[in-house]
Image (tube, helix red, strand yellow):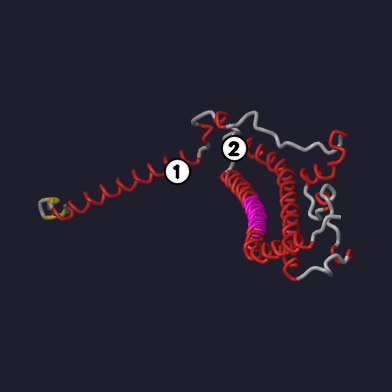
Amino acid sequence: MHAQFGIFGPIVVYDPAVVLRNTLTAALEELIVNTEDAQRSQIRKMARRLSVFTNVDQYALTDTPEWRIHDFLSDAVLYAKGYHAALNYGDGSGSAYLGITNPLVAVEDEGITSGLNTVAWEAFRARLATINAADAVAIAATHDDGLLRYNGRREQAAIEALETHVTDPSTTHSTTAVIDTLSGAVLIGARQRQARTQFIADIVEQLLVDTKRARDTDATALNMQLTTWRESRAANNAFAAGTGDALQTWRQP
């Protein structure tokens, strides 16, 4: 719509295309403004803490179990104090575990293997390897258990502090503080997953030692049976020949 000035005053000219363009432009601008207002309102709601809408204390846990500590000071565990302390704090050297186990006599010092044949020495060496493997697995598991128990108490304190921040009803916490809280929770979760992985490895190693021990037992029994079958005919013939000869040469005293 345009206004033109003629001799007799302004003349109004109606242009449908211009009117349509202006109408669409106004409608689009209104839609954009309304959309931005809705987005701004939604972002403002999302930026608010959950405590604005509900009581966050309902998500806090009470009476959580404490980490148990093995007694290593009283005389009730007089002969296992060192090992109980290792179960509480760890023992990478394995001295506590070796202190409560029967020591293995040094084979080289005794010189008892000099008269063994190859088959006997292989069987004896396999049994020695089983004991050494069992000691290594037990020492590693004891150390991991002690570290988990020791670090578990510290992690529990960190989790309780984190819970305090999460359930804080204050609305003054910044977004950075909330992100730091999330980062702390992720870090604690990663450490706990790592500890579980270590324990799974310890369990697998113990199962491997048990499997080897069972396999060695079965192999020993099977070898004894095979040797009996293999040597039985010759042994029976020798026994029969010896018995017959003894009966033939026996005389009444």
Reading the image, the residue beneath label 1 is 43
> On the image, which quarter does residue 154 sit in?
top right
Q: Residue at x 55, y 28 (%)?
A: 58
Instruction: Tell me which amino acid carries mark 1.
Output: Ile
Residue 203 image label? none
Question: How many numbered circles does the render carry?
Answer: 2
- Element under disc 1: helix
Query: Is 23 in the magenta?
Result: no
Reading the image, the residue beneath label 2 is 166
Q: Mark 1 and mark 2: span between their CA atoms?
A: 21 Å
- Element under disc 2: helix
Q: Quadrant of the C terminus?
A: bottom right
- Camera-nearest residue between 241 and 189: 241
Q: Position of residue 165 (x, y in %)?
A: 62, 37
Judge the density around disc 2: few (<14), some (14-19), many (≥20) Cα neighbours within 10 Å. Answer: many
- Camera-nearest residue between 3 and 67: 67
Q: Residue at x 64, y 35 (%)?
A: 164
- Prevailing secondary structure class for the magenta stretch in the rendered image: helix
Instruction: Tell me which amino acid carries mark 2.
Output: Val
